[in-house]
Image (cartoon, coloured by chain):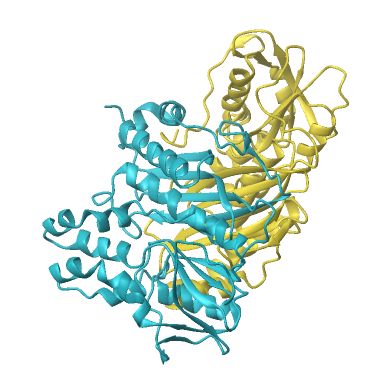
Chain colours: A yellow, B cyan
Amino acid sequence: MPTIFELGEKESLKRALAPLKASEFAIIGSGDDAAVMKAPGGNYLVSTDTMIENHDFRFDFSSAFDLGWKAIASNYSDIAAMGGIPTGAVVALSVRSETEIDWLTEFVRGLQQASETLAPGSGIVGGDLATSEQGFISVTAFGDLDGLRPLVRSSAQPGDGLFVGGTLGKAAAGLALLQHPDPQYARSYDELVNIQLRPTPPIELGKLANEQGATSMMDISDGLSTDAKRLAEASGVNINIESSSLLGFQAVLEQAALSIEASTLPWVLHGGEDHSLLATFPPDAQVPKGFKRIGSVLQGDAELTLDGELIQPQGWDSVTGD
Amino acid sequence: MPTIFELGEKESLKRALAPLKASEFAIIGSGDDAAVMKAPGGNYLVSTDTMIENHDFRFDFSSAFDLGWKAIASNYSDIAAMGGIPTGAVVALSVRSETEIDWLTEFVRGLQQASETLAPGSGIVGGDLATSEQGFISVTAFGDLDGLRPLVRSSAQPGDGLFVGGTLGKAAAGLALLQHPDPQYARSYDELVNIQLRPTPPIELGKLANEQGATSMMDISDGLSTDAKRLAEASGVNINIESSSLLGFQAVLEQAALSIEASTLPWVLHGGEDHSLLATFPPDAQVPKGFKRIGSVLQGDAELTLDGELIQPQGWDSVTGD
């Protein structure tokens, strides 16, 4: 099996990119100095996020397909969180020069499948391949608001309900299982491990929430407590989470937690990488199916409480790594 | 001086991003899940490029300001090469955790100044900061065509003239001077070193060339021979470069070349990173001032010749590193 070093950039990309379908929003896709994308509403959404070897991923945990999938899923959730639909992405990848061409082909297949599955019609419109000693994947995703307003995180209103669309804690549980020295635990709870490796954020709920009058939204990438606190700060409100509303999220993690002597509440409250949506809706809104109420927005000065008690965010910081 | 690790992601970004001006094309800039950009013409340009420590840059050659500047300049030239104007960029940066906050502030100042200087009104609209053992900078730039068609590399026509806008070989000469063991040579030719460290591609020529009916265009990032060959292949034409037309580009490098016993022709013909524009114009075009004729487009099957003799491209491959 030839390595990408042996093939060089041009031939590697030619082989790996062959099965790629262009975004339906692309007027000119990959291959020229720049892609040209349609912006039918006269504006477009842009978000960027990076995954770094041994900080955000490990080659022994994640397959090439998984990494391609996750890179797209984690960026598309940011587009959904603005109330839009993802239209495409550009991907910068750097891996060791001895990487085999099959790895690259599988990575591209992961990008393509995530793109098609999570946002039908979207696609990869450009990229950059290089070699380095430490691997990284940097994705910039694009989106369309379809004429709707952008749904920012700074407009939650006292009186709103706080809702989650998607899973909570499953990705953190999956990571804990993967990190356990005995690999049998990861094998026993493959649904949780799969959410960690190939998250499936509810992308379509983003635009639906926008249409149904959500007042604010963001994606939960660094953990519910960290991201809810950010929402509170951006909106200048207090947020109270009701622990009773988290019991359903905890229940599905119970067995896995018991097996490795962990607790479910920290996973649900502080665990990152589910890439679910955190939204606020006014009391009279028709909240789309798929969102679950977990708390309330209150007047105040950016405090985060659980059943009225102050709590400290304990999510992920990409600089300090904890 | 605190490090970014000591401050964490949020506080580091707060300090470093304070002086940043938003793009005039940004409806919502940095700070939410995604930025919202204007696309007045109903479409937008997207390009991405990455710089990796010890492959594309060295911290002992480049200051933080230089790296910020170069990251923007090299991406904006891709936007210009499509015949558009840059409107903004998102920047993913990863550096060692012991990096001091002043380094980050200077890097952002480089981003900002390049953006303002090379494309007034453009600006940084988002980013991502992380830590890693090997540093890298990945930029995705955006652009607007102002109602013009995108100027691709696949539409050069036999009979066109071949033109360069910007410098040729200066960046390669600068790199050779920097790599010389005796630092006095780099100090003696600071104009060349400065082009290597802070390239100043003629961004405004991109849109001008489009308005004046250029038939094709691309940026010269990997060397004239490599990129002219790509243009020939994409357009299905032969390209002949006239060596006499390169003498002017060689003349300004002569003294530096003599000083370190190098030759000027390889720099001009194969040297990368000037990020100049390579364009083709029909015989009757009013070629904008700033472009210099260097050859012709001929019927044929993607051959590249110098005065009619076949030559092999010898530019940069980001995978093999040579």
Decide which of B108, A241 is in the foreground and name it: B108
Asked if residue B201 is positioned above or below residue B229 in the image, the reply reads: above
Total numbered badges shown on the rendered structure: 0
Tell me residue B248's x, y (percent): 31, 71
Taking the spot 26% from the left edge, 71% from the top edge, the residue there is: B251
Decide which of B87, A232 is in the foreground and name it: B87
Asked if residue A118 is positioned above or below residue A148 in the image, the reply reads: below
Tell me residue B77's x, y (percent): 48, 57
Image quadrant of residue A243?
top right
Taking the spot 30% from the left edge, 63% from the top edge, the residue there is: B170
Using residue B276 as the reference point, say whether residue A92 is left or right of it.
right
Visible in this render: residue A200?
no
Taking the spot 42% from the left edge, 66% from the top edge, the residue there is: B318
Asked if residue B239 is positioned above or below residue B251 in the image, the reply reads: below
Image quadrant of residue A152?
top right
Tell me residue A261's x, y (percent): 55, 33
Tell me residue A65's x, y (percent): 60, 60
Of the 4 image quadrants, the one containing the C terminus of chain B is bottom left
Of the 4 image quadrants, the one containing the N terminus of chain B is top left
Using residue B50 as the reference point, say whether residue A171 is left or right of it.
right
Decide which of B216, A134 is in the foreground and name it: B216
Asked if residue A243 is positioned above or below residue A22 in the image, the reply reads: above
Visible in this render: residue B38?
yes
Taking the spot 39% from the left edge, 53% from the top edge, the residue there is: B200
Decide which of B269, A202 is in the foreground and name it: B269
